[in-house]
């Protein structure tokens, strides 16, 4: 029996699944972050190794685990230089002490961006579109011919439209404009004060600037806007509608680039933004299906690490 490792490495955690050639998950392990560009190569190697070790330990297997293929879907891995770095990490993994043996050939090592494994895991096959809207945002698609198209993923300064970060920033901006009298009244003013424990809205400056809040901390304020929109606030709903328009535009761009207008395409939606109270998923679905009636919008069928496992397994069957 063949054994496969699928690894999903991001900025907050690393997930590894051990899979057999029947697509069955035998073990799953988690560890710390593995974005080498932010935490360094040594720490990334340690996280991936720990995730693999934990997945093997979780599996109930009496015989030796001989790994025939591996796929690493890692955040920020897009360039040739990045792939070469990760290839070096795989060599290190093979030299380190893990409760497995390796039977890897170069063709059985898949290194890719985490958007691809989110697509494959979410849909269950490597064809379709993933619309990821969490702290950041990226839209990625792949057709039956293997052609791909990516839209967004440029980070919180240059892009990330439709993300939790941009929704939170737009919400705070609207609250401050309301306070100034520049824009219409909105419940977001009091909502942010209450959520952050502020005496007055001017104290928001101290929270965002002086405390040095990072992107994830700011993105975590998106639910304030979501709740206000669900409660009927006009300004908050405009912000949500703008986010939907951006995500629909990006998804439409991918469809136009690699699919035909009448293609039956599955679009999987991943990330925290889709799970709010203001029906953003329904709004997005209605808008994209109006433009492309054959599109089917779904939530993920499997996790990204499973998608990595499927991509690795594919190399053993060619």
Image (spheres, grey):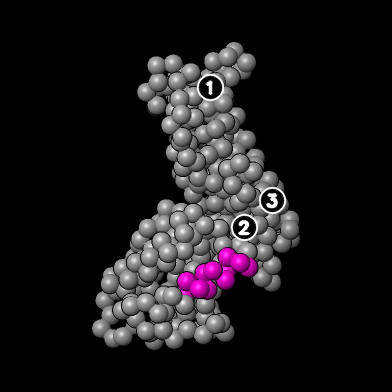
Q: Residues within 10 Å of mark 2 (few under 14, many from 20)?
A: many
Relative side of 157 to 272, left or right: right
Q: Can residue 275 be seen in the rendering of this structure? A: yes
Disc 2 versus disc 3: distance between alpha carbons? 11 Å
Q: Which mark is first along the chain, 2 or 1?
A: 2
Q: Residue at x 40, y 26 (%)?
A: 196
Viewer-side residue, 83 vs 252:
83
**Residue 140: which numbered mark, if any?**
2
Residue depicted at x 66% and y 70%: 146
Q: Which residue is mark 1?
A: 175
Q: Mark 2 falls on what kind of element?
A: strand
Percent across and percent down for residue 88 are 50, 73
**Could you say whether the residue bearing mark 3 is in a helix, strand or loop?**
helix
In the rendered image, which residue does mark 3 sit on?
252
Q: Residue 128: say if magenta.
A: no
> Which of marks 3 and 2 precedes in the sequence?
2
Q: Is residue 241 left or right of residue 34?
A: right
The answer to which of 135 and 294 lies nearer the viewer is 135
Comparing 275 with 168, the one in front is 168
**Residue 128: which quarter of the image?**
bottom right
């Amino acid at each position: 029996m063949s054994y496969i490792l699928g690894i999903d490495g991001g900025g907050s955690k690393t997930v590894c699944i051990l899979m057999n050639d029947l697509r069955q998950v035998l073990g799953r392990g988690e560890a710390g972050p593995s974005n080498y560009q932010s935490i360094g190569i040594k720490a990334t190697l340690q996280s991936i190794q720990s995730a693999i070790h934990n997945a093997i330990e979780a599996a109930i297997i009496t015989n030796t685990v001989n790994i025939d293929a591996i796929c690493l879907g890692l955040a920020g891995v897009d360039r040739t230089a990045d792939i070469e770095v990760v290839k070096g990490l795989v060599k290190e993994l093979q030299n380190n002490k893990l409760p497995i043996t390796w039977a890897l050939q170069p063709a059985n090592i898949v290194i890719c961006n985490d958007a691809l494994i989110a697509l494959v895991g979410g849909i269950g096959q490597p064809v379709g579109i993933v619309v990821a809207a969490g702290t950041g945002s990226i839209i990625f698609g792949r057709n039956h011919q293997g052609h791909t198209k990516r839209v967004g993923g440029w980070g919180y300064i240059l892009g990330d439209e439709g993300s939790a970060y941009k929704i939170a920033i737009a919400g705070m901006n609207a609250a401050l404009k309301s306070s100034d009298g520049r824009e219409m009244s909105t419940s977001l003013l009091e909502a942010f004060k209450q959520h952050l424990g502020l005496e007055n809205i001017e104290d928001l400056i101290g929270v965002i600037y002086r405390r040095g809040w990072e992107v994830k901390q700011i993105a975590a304020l998106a639910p304030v806007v979501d709740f206000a929109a669900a409660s009927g606030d006009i300004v908050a709903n405009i912000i949500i509608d703008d986010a939907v328009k951006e995500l629909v535009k990006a998804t439409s761009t991918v469809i136009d680039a690699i699919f035909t207008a009448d293609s039956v395409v599955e679009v999987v939606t991943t990330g925290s933004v889709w799970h709010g109270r203001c029906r953003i998923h329904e709004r997005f679905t209605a808008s994209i299906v109006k433009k492309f009636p054959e599109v089917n919008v779904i939530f993920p069928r499997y996790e990204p690490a499973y998608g990595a496992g499927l991509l690795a397994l594919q190399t053993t069957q060619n």
